[in-house]
Image (cartoon, rainbow, N blue to C red):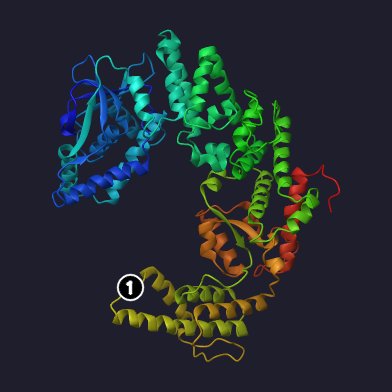
Amino acid sequence: MAGENGIRRILDLYGITFKIPHYQRGYKWTKVEIERLLGDIKEFMDKDGNNGATRYFIQPIMVKKDKKENTYTLVDGQQRLTTIYMIMKALGEKPGYHLEYEKYEGNGGYEKLEDILSKIRSKNYNNADTPDEYYICQGYKTIDNWLESNKLKNDALYRKKFADTIKCKVYVVWYELGEKENEREVFIRINSGKIPLTDSELIRGLLLQKKNFDNNEINRMLYSERWDKIQMRLEEDDFWYFLSGKSGNDYETRMDFVFEVIAGRKKDERYSIYQEVKENLEKEKIEKFWKNVEKVFSYMEYLYRNDEMYHYFGFLTSTNKEVGRNLLSQITSIKKNNKNNNKNNQDQVCENKSSKSEILDCLKSEIKNQLQSRMSDTKKNNIKAFIDGLIYGNNDADIKFILLLFNVITAIKTPGYRFPFDIYNRSEWSLEHIHPREFEGLGKNKDLVKWLCEEYKGITEDNTDIKECIEYAIQVVGRKIEESGKKQKENKEPKSNGEENNTIQECLKLVKDKEISKPPNCEIEESMDPKKIGEIILKKLNEYYSASTESSDINGIGNLALLQKDLNSSLQNRSFKVKRGKILNWYKKGEHFIPPATLNAFLKAYTEDPNTLHVWHTKDMEDYKKAIIEAIKEKLLKEVKNEQ
């Protein structure tokens, strides 16, 4: 390398214009990288001089001198300099250097970062038109929120100190390329050794080279706009997670998925897809290559816009990481899969299928194949026997598969409703026992007393043995809480959460003014621990509600529903009535997504002539399980004979 190398403060960069060529990835830093940089600078500033450090170094930047004065091509360092620029803007400072991005509108040229920020600011940081705008917009919002949460927004002196620290004490290592060095080759070489460019980012640079367009900037602009249109669509989470399912978070750049579909395989090593595209572009014209890209994208949109295809395809991608890419490769028939490409050895059920009916049939066939692969040979053609044999703790993956399928079928049968695969695939899901199976997880007095109060309020009859026993239990546990509070005060221990204490006090008021002696049929003793008290009350609740406690009922699919893991944890071992109230409240307020079949179960929509909404009986379990079996038979297994 040649040129003037060394270290420079951010202040030393003032007056310089940095040009960012099209072959680079664009701004892609996420909340993680941005907040890490902000946090590091803040920590350095707060400790400045106390730990011997007087300079804070960020990663090196690499440049090549341009013909214009004080102008450089920025070969490496775009992410850092863009972020520093936006931090200074958010602090109310005027950044002293300039960043310009090569663009494709009109006659090409460059667009200033300042102009991009002004544009997205005028839209209130919404509705970005290009991928660059989208990521810059998200980055600026992250910076603004961080400054707000760290109380820099309203503290002018601290804000000024933060800006001065960046200008005068944040340093970069400056590498300047020689005149004869090829900046693009250097760019690819250095990125292969750190945060690498993705295949699609390299393909974009390859595609948009000026030599491919005989210097026709209009055509080059059109291809760039088409690319941006597809990339922006893939940034919409409802579209993306429908396509990619559980593998959605595995992609650094979502456009990579498109090129994997075209290649008919997942990349097996870094840049293998890029190398394949590069070789193909040397043999065929860009028009043919791009025709395949748009064909894949048009089928993605086609599957998304048809309700039935949307649900079946979304279900498949949500249960198998590989299946979405493989099925799209088959449907588009750009490159046939072979056994080497197809790691799951899937049958090519969707090869050369193009009409709506053909695609629907092949999607259903693939679901049926996956369903039957889970069955033992003796149950291959008997969905009822398979579902009857599913037991919580032994067959959790199969139960989740069946319950998700039932929810998706429920969504298909509900006019105007679409199952939100983006929410499903970004969340953790667990199996909720509709009727509690046993008392566990409430080993603390405070948790126990809140549970007791909820169950107490749920019993509408007066003077029942169960109600009297719960009243006594609340008093016993309340005394334990008071004793614990006194010890905390004496030992000067930190106070408990105020909101939690208020909730507990409200509970204790239910029995505070009552003179309660131990009821004759209540086995609770003052010396018992919280878990034992809970077990006694749960047993009495089961007897009161006439609920089944048979293990085969409690742990069968008729007593299980899909629920987000954090919601499941918050319900713990509440009775059906209390769980039902909480779930309906979440649904009415729109606070959480409740899968449609889960909601229907707690509404007892599957029960014929429900006699009570207070408890989940054996009959409710049987009717719910029957509804699951019939829905799967109706939609997927009509042609399977010898069903029972």
Q: Up-down: is 602 above or below 529? A: above
Please state the horizontal and vertical placement of residue 110, each as a whole percent of the image: 31, 20
Residue that sits furthest to the right in the current view: 642
| Quarter residue 314 falls in | top right
- Please name the residue that numbered disc 1 is placed on: 495
On the picture, is 131 further left or further right than 472? left
Residue type pointed to by label 1: Lys
Q: Is mark 1 on a helix, strand or loop?
A: loop
Q: In which quadrant of the rendered image does the C terminus lie?
A: bottom right
Please state the horizontal and vertical placement of residue 96, each as a whole percent of the image: 19, 30
Q: Up-down: is 361 above or below 144? A: above
Q: Up-down: is 346 above or below 617? A: above
| Residue depicted at x 63% and y 78% | 539
Q: Up-down: is 63 above or below 87? A: above
Residue 285 is at least partly visible in this image: no
Please state the horizontal and vertical placement of residue 352, each as a whole percent of the image: 70, 25
Residue that sits furthest to the top in the current view: 214
Please state the horizontal and vertical placement of residue 72, each as a whole percent of the image: 24, 21
**Dot 1, how many residues are within 10 Å of its Cα: few (below 14), some (14-19), or many (20+)?**
few
| Residue depicted at x 69% and y 62% | 556
Q: In which quadrant of the rendered image does the N terminus lie?
A: top left
Q: Which of 440 and 485 is in front in this view?
A: 440
On the picture, is 154 further left or further right than 221? left
Q: Which of 175 and 47 is in front in this view?
A: 175
Residue 537 is at least partly visible in this image: yes
On the picture, is 508 further left or further right than 587? left
**Total numbered circles:** 1
